[in-house]
Image (cartoon, rainbow, N blue to C red):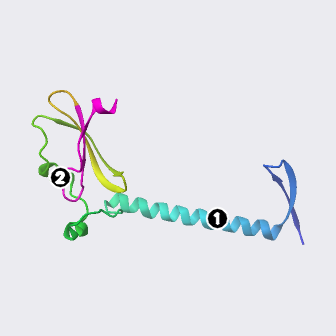
Amino acid sequence: MARLRIFHWKTGKWMIMSRLFAFTVLVIALALGLAAAWLGNRAWDHYERGEPHEVFLGEDRESEKNGPLSLQELLQRLSLPEKSRILEIELERHEGVLLYEIELLTPAGTVKEILVDPRTGQVMGGSRTDEEEE
């Protein structure tokens, strides 16, 4: 049987391995790499199309079927302070639940962070100001 010499990086020694074993390891590594690339591409396609890929929690089963609200509809449902400016909106996981994190600048010049349920537009918990984070 044909043998193959390979250098083991951890021990710093040369090892002898059968070519069949080396070929098997190579095929398995290639299959795992292709599976990872396929799964990554599939998740990216869902993201690009805007399809919901997370489970949103809540009591309301009807809105669970529809997924998250559009940002325009969400902002219409919120009663934000007048003349405030939105700085950033992110969809993030807080304590296992997906929430919109809305950062806004109030007319008083403070930065507020509001956590909002993406399906209902309901403000979840309190809001934090930049002074509380320091």
Check disc 2 and report the residue beneath it: 74
Check disc 1 and report the residue beneath it: 30
Find the distance from the CA under tag 1 to the CA under tag 2.
45 Å
Q: Residue at x 90, y 72 (%)?
A: 1
Indicate whether residue 117 is drawn in magenta. Answer: yes
User: Is 25 situated left or right of 105 in this image?
Assistant: right
Q: Amino acid at mark 1?
A: Leu
Measured as percent of width and height from the top left, residue 104 is found at 22, 37
Residue lying furthest top in this view?
109
82 and 24: which is toward the camera: 82
Report the number of numbered marks: 2
Badge 1 or badge 2: first in the primary sequence: 1
Q: Which residues are magenta?
A: 111-134
Crowd class of label 2 (few under 14; some 14 to 19; many from 20; radius 10 Å): some
Measured as percent of width and height from the top left, residue 51 is found at 32, 63
Measured as percent of width and height from the top left, residue 101 is found at 28, 46
Q: Nearer the viewer, mark 1 or mark 2?
A: 2
